Image (cartoon, grey):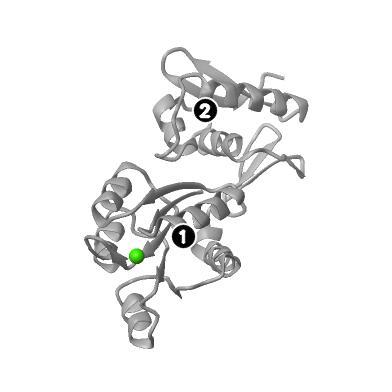
Amino acid sequence: MRILLIEDEYELANAVRIALERERFVVDTAASLAHARASAEGAAHDLVLLDRTLPDGDGLALLPALRSRNRGVPVIVLSALGKLADRIEGLDEGADDYLAKPFALEELMARIRAIRRRPSDLASETITLGRLCFDPACDEASVQGQRLDLPRRELRVIACLVQRKGRTVMRETLEQAVFGYDDEIHSNTLDSHVSRLRRKLADADAGVEIHAVRGVGYLLRAAPC
Ligand code: CA
């Protein structure tokens, strides 16, 4: 799951980012409306955390653009503007939730979990290939009921591949799914995640293989019996 965090207070943004990454989310951060617009255009996000008081305007101004690009994306406003009228304005403008600052990180995490439990998210069905299952609602990969304990980036690789099973996934698409914009991508980093993942899938007897398509990317397919 990829989250766009729009927040101009550096320390708060950093604390939220670290807490989200601990939950194995990929996080893109933006500190202004302009930067947020560019980030939203560059990647499909599964959730947006939106500050209101930004250097170039009210974060709520971003909502129509976010919705026109990615209609169902949930948005949680995080704002020091916490009066009743502010909260009503935010929700009426189309935010899914509104958390007044200061807030506890635990509460933010609980609200993210609540949003992810909504029916629209549950509608995304479990995908299977070989003996591998991927459940997008829980963001979990398992083999015959046994959860695979994968680090965040390996989980993102398998999620991206299994959602496009049998098709070649371009390197750039995988890198975008796996790394945040702030990460430096070394040319062999993706390949090392893939090779660790291959080993784990083989150890778990998942019945799938990650096939390298030279110069293009990777594809996930059922392993020959
Ligand atoms: Ca702010």
Q: Residue at x 53, y 53 (%)?
A: 124
Q: Residue at label 1?
A: 12
Label 2 element class = loop
Name the foreground residue: 171 vs 30: 30
Please state if 43 lies on the left or on the right of 137 as rendered.
left
Q: CA distance from mark 2 to mark 1?
A: 41 Å
Q: Disc number at residue 166?
A: 2
Q: Is residue 218 above or below residue 100?
A: above
User: 38 left or right of 27?
Assistant: left
Q: What's the residue type where badge 1 is placed?
A: Leu
> Eyeballing the image, is 210 above or below 44?
above
Q: In this image, 140 relative to 51: left or right? A: right
Tell me which residue sits at (30%, 58%) in the image: 66
- Toward the top, the furthest residue is 214
- Identity of the residue drawn at 56% across and 65% down: 105
Q: Residue at x 46, y 12 (%)?
A: 214
Looking at the rendering, which quadrant does residue 221 occupy?
top right
